[in-house]
Amino acid sequence: MSSTESLPLLLKQLRLHQVSAHWQDYANQANEQHWSYSDYLATLCNLEATQRQQDKIKRRLKQAKLPANKTIDSFDFDAAPSINAAQMQSLAHDTQWVHKAHNLIIFGPSGAGKTHLASAIAYQMIHKDIRCLFTSTMALVQSLQQAKQAYKLNEAIAKLARIPLLILDDIGYVRKDEAETSVLFELIADRYENNSLIITANQSFSEWGEIFPDHVMAVAAVDRLVHHATIINIDEDSYRTRNACQNNSTHS
Ligand code: ADP
Ligand code: MG
């Protein structure tokens, strides 16, 4: 039998930080309350596992770069009757669509709540062990273009392929004349049937010709995106404007 003297050092070496911090307290409690050895061990293992899960979620939330405080609980569905609340709740709580590499495309005018909903769904997915990354489409296209110039586009796309859910916010802000957006097509083609995308857009598919270098590429991109996708149209005025109007009318 090993001596308990070496226990603090062993627990440190094994990186069992919770066990290390609590084993003595629980040993006293176990003695007083006549726990079995296995109950004592299970309690400590539980502490360790819970803490690790919480740390992992914290780490993944940080890596995901979601806009702050945009959760499903803070979304006012009553203020957005054109949104099917049950459908959104199901997308936020059921991970099946991500496991199947399906997409979600959210259309709607500026301020309608697209970014909020996309972030809210990603927030829930992270809590269900799915890695996410939120990015403005423009910023991602720029970084992919830089990678392409450095002959590292495949590497960059492969790195993104390790993230099962990628949120491309405001795809419509990308303009084909700003730079070569074929990198965006390459990303979409790579993720097709392998990984999920949430895309927010304030213009309909018919206007996506503005985003891609040519019509054929635009059609091919839309084709891949919608093949396995849930498409949501938010038909609301800007929440910000509605709020401002309401505040003004209550103050007047
Ligand atoms: P979009 O991406 O469609 O332009 P956002 O999601 O950024 O719009 O929404 C604009 C602001 O209004 C954000 O601060 C968002 O949190 C808030 N918002 C929009 N719709 C709602 C809603 N139904 N309930 C609560 N907040 C909302
Ligand atoms: Mg937005």
Image (cartoon, grey):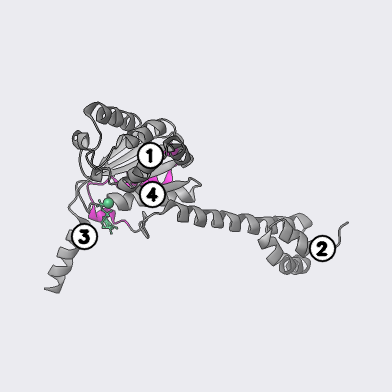
Is residue 196 depicted above or below 116 in this figure? above
How far apart in space, not on screen, are marks 2 and 1 (Cα)?
55 Å
Q: Residue tagged by mark 3?
A: 240
Residue density around tag 2, few if under 14, some if 14–19, many if 20 or more, within 10 Å: few
Q: CA distance from mark 2 to mark 4?
A: 45 Å
Q: Where in the figure is residue 98, as x and y percent of width and height?
A: 43, 38
Q: Is mark 3 within 8 Å of ligand 1?
A: yes
In the shown orientation, is residue 122 left or right of residue 244? right
Label 2 and label 3: CA atoms lie apart by 61 Å
Under circle 2, the secondary element is helix
- Three-letter amino acid code at the position of disc 4: Phe
Is the residue marked 4 within 8 Å of ligand 2, measured from its CB? no
Q: Element under label 1? A: helix
Eye-nearest disc, 2 or 1: 1
Residue 32 falls in which quadrant of the image?
Answer: bottom right
Q: Nearer the viewer, mark 3 or mark 1?
A: 1
For the residue marked with disc 1, what is the amino acid?
Gln
- Give the main secondary structure, helix, strand or loop, of the magenta stretch: helix
Name which residue type carries label 2.
Ser
Q: CA distance from mark 4 to mark 3?
A: 22 Å
Going from N to C along the chain, the mark reached first, 3 or 1, is 1
Quarter placement of the C terminus: bottom left
Residue span colored magenta: 75-98
- Foreground disc of the pair 4, 3: 4
Q: Which of marks 3 and 4 precedes in the sequence?
A: 4
Which residue does the numbered mark 2 point to in the structure image? Answer: 6
Q: Residue furthest bottom?
A: 251
- Tell me the crowding category of disc 1: few under 14, some 14 to 19, or many 20 or more residues within 10 angstroms, Cα based: few
State the mark number for residue 149.
1
